[in-house]
Image (spheres, coloured by chain):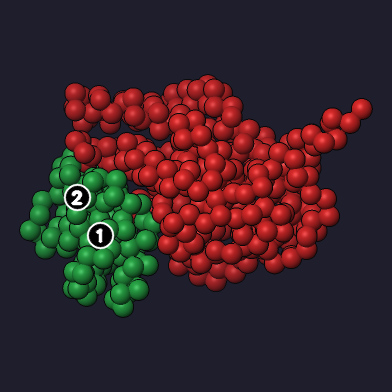
Chain colours: A green, B red
């Protein structure tokens, strides 16, 4: 298993720990600024990465916007921790970006996972 | 949202290309980060090194680069990807340096505030008996933007090079001035560099630990009350919450807390400004409104928070202070004490 495969496996395992309580949604500054679109929240971004990794979504402009507009401010993690789940949400989104960035830099519009 | 894929692709290529070509995320070739230290006579070597990582000095250029990127956005759907990429590559390699430097001349206010903040930090450290060295034109950028964008391989290369430079000075302790560089040095560099052994401290931690009340406090020109905007990185990543409050308390400035504060602080929108300026502005507007509702004087201790909240100063009637600016007024005496000036 190469490094990218190990990273994918780890990400999917971590996303499976999310209980979908959605407390992280309301506190996300980008969710607040976008008048309540869930794709612009921590939960939404985790779902996007999950479905990109499993091949159920195709990487397009709107998904790029959702993933790269994460501020990495960790406000979602504070609430996740207080609800007892303690996911490193921003780290997971950052790792998702890491899988994408190399391809985006090389492939531009035609980048795929 | 339209053409986001191309925009991000282009941003990633431009930033990593600039770093490889010039060692600067904006691609500037000329040294622009030493002017603030010209009259401070800081030594070039010593056990304690001040590492600004150019973050404050970069502010006037960041504002211009963001404006120019915004101006180019309408071209993205019109041009083919190859043409746009080629244009951006040529513009970055040939014209970025002179154009950015020329346009940044207009941003005198930002430049003077950034330089004042850095000078204030050095003066406050001096008052506490700490006299750091500074790398001047050899000071590198920390690579934090590469890390944030997920460009891990490039970030690792930069981290190793920066570590070699810092170790080369013989310094044991590195004093940082902004949360982002502190986070890189304290949490990211040790992941990439085996045996990382620099003692990394933020200047506010040092000033809070010293504990002494400054001997001379020039009160004029300082706010009596100030509302605190905590940086996300400082509080949630680094767990540094109280030092800024302790230092302000010693200076006799009352700290007011907004609704979202300390580890529950709200972001200024800065991290996405490089590509999504509209979204960044909406987020900073929400935060600025919240802060303006508490007090017209707002305190930040981060260059990114400073430029993002500064945008709303006129509209919301607020004055955003960087902690370094406050320290400069207290310790450097750059501004004449009004009570003394009025005496015959």
Residue B306 image offset from top left, x and y in percent: 52, 42
Viewer-nearest residue: B25 or A107: B25
Chain label for disc 2? A
Give the secondary structure at mark 2: loop
Residue B280 in view of the camera: no
Residue B93 image offset from top left, x and y in percent: 42, 29
What residue is rendered at 39% in x and 57% in y? A73
| Left or right position of A74 against B335 | left
Return the mark for residue B126: none
What residue is rendered at 14% in x and 57% in y? A52
Return the mark for residue A25: 1
Q: Residues within 10 Å of mark 2 (few under 14, many from 20)?
A: few
Residue B94 image offset from top left, x and y in percent: 43, 25
Q: Earlier in the sequence, mark 1 or mark 2?
A: 1
Quadrant housing residue B1: top left
Which residue position holds label 2? Answer: A37
Whole-number angstrom distance, CA of label 1 to CA of label 2: 9 Å
Q: Residues within 10 Å of mark 1 (few under 14, many from 20)?
A: many
The residue positioned farthest toward the right in the image shown: B344
The residue positioned farthest toward the bottom in the image shown: A84
> Is B221 situated above or below B86?
below
The residue positioned farthest toward the left in the image shown: A56
| Left or right position of B80 against B250 | left
The image shows a total of numbered marks equal to 2
What residue is rendered at 84% in x and 30% in y? B342
| Left or right position of B280 against B21 | left
Chain label for disc 1? A
Residue B329 image offset from top left, x and y in percent: 72, 42
Residue A7 in view of the camera: yes
Quadrant housing residue A72: bottom left
């Amino acid at each position: 298993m190469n490094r990218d495969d190990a990273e994918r496996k780890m990400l999917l395992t971590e996303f499976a720990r999310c209980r979908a309580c959605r407390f992280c949604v309301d506190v996300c500054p980008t969710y607040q600024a976008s008048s309540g679109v869930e794709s612009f929240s921590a939960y939404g971004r985790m779902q996007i990465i999950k479905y990109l990794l499993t091949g159920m979504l195709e990487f397009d402009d709107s998904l790029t916007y959702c993933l790269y507009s994460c501020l990495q401010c960790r406000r979602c993690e504070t609430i996740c921790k207080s609800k007892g789940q303690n996911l490193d949400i921003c780290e997971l989104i950052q790792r998702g970006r890491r899988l994408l960035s190399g391809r985006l830099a090389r492939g531009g519009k035609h980048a795929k996972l | 949202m339209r053409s986001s894929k191309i925009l991000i692709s282009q941003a990633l290529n431009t930033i990593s290309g600039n770093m490889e070509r010039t060692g600067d995320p904006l691609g500037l070739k000329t040294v622009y980060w030493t002017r603030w230290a010209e009259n401070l006579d800081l030594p070039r070597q010593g056990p304690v090194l001040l590492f600004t990582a150019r973050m404050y000095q970069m502010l006037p250029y960041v504002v211009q680069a963001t404006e120019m990127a915004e101006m180019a956005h309408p071209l993205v759907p019109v041009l083919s990807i190859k043409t746009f990429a080629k244009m951006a590559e040529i513009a970055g390699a040939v014209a970025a340096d002179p154009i950015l430097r020329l346009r940044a001349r207009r941003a005198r206010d930002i430049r003077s505030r950034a330089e004042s903040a850095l000078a204030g930090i050095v003066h406050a450290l001096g008052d506490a008996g700490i006299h750091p060295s500074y790398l001047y034109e050899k000071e590198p950028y920390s690579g934090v933007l590469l890390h944030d964008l997920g460009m891990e391989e490039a970030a690792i290369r930069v981290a190793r090079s920066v570590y070699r430079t810092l170790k080369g000075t013989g310094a044991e302790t590195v004093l940082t001035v902004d949360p982002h560089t502190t986070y890189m040095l304290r949490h990211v560099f040790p992941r990439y560099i085996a045996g990382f052994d620099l003692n990394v401290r933020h200047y506010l931690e040092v000033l809070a630990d010293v504990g002494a009340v400054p001997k001379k406090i020039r009160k004029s020109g300082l706010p009596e009350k100030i509302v605190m905007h905590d940086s996300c990185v400082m509080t949630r990543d680094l767990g540094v919450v109280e030092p800024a409050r302790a230092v302000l308390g010693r200076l006799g400035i009352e700290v007011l807390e907004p609704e979202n504060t300390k580890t529950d602080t709200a972001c200024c929108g800065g991290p996405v400004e490089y590509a999504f300026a509209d979204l960044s502005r909406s987020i900073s507007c929400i935060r600025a409104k919240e802060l303006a509702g508490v007090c017209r004087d707002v305190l930040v201790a981060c260059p990114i928070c400073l430029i993002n909240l500064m945008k709303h100063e006129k509209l919301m009637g607020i004055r955003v202070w960087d902690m370094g600016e406050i320290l400069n007024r207290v310790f450097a005496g750059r501004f004449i004490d009004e009570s003394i000036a009025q005496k015959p």
